[in-house]
Image (tube, grey):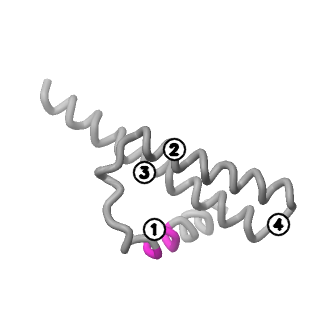
Amino acid sequence: MLQTFCTDQEQVMKANDHKGHWHDMTFDLIGFKMRAKQQKLTDAICSNKLADIKKHATDLAVYCAMIHDKASKKIAERTARK
């Protein structure tokens, strides 16, 4: 299950490489975009559209990965300064 999920996330990230780097996005902006993705996922769940559920769950997970990566880098920077 996890391997398939990670493969789906990788495909989404590769498909969106042309959009530029998200590293410059603030946590607030990423959170805003996540809420929009969450709404799409909720709508898909309510409509029982399985392909859309899978797509939007993957999209949402990519945003979670962005936040995790960004937070990890900030923690590492703070730790290195000490």
Among the two numbered marks 1 and 2 on one chain, the one whose residue lies closer to the N terminus: 1
The residue sitting at 53% across, 65% down in the picture is 9
Image coordinates of residue 57 in percent, x first then y, are: 66, 57
Q: Which residues are magenta?
A: 10-15
Residues at marks 1 and 2 touching, judged by CB atoms closer than 8 Å: no
Among the two numbered marks 2 and 3 on one chain, the one whose residue lies closer to the N terminus: 2
Instruction: From the image, state whether disc 3 or disc 4 is nearer to you.
Output: 4
Q: Which amino acid type is marked by label 1? A: Met
Name the residue tied to disc 1: 13
The residue sitting at 86% across, 60% down in the picture is 47
In the picture as drawn, the residue positioned furthest to the left comes out as 81
Give the spatial CA distance, label 3 vs label 1: 10 Å
Name the residue tied to disc 2: 32
Relative to residue 11, is residue 1 depicted above or below?
above
Graded by Cα atoms within 10 Å as few (under 14), some (14 to 19) or many (20 or more), the crowding at tag 1 reads some
Q: Which amino acid type is marked by label 2? A: Phe
Instruction: From the image, state whether disc 2 or disc 3 is nearer to you.
Output: 2
Among the two numbered marks 3 and 1 on one chain, the one whose residue lies closer to the N terminus: 1
Name the residue tied to disc 3: 66
Q: Which amino acid type is marked by label 4? A: Lys
Name the residue tied to disc 4: 49
- Quadrant of the image containing the C terminus: top left
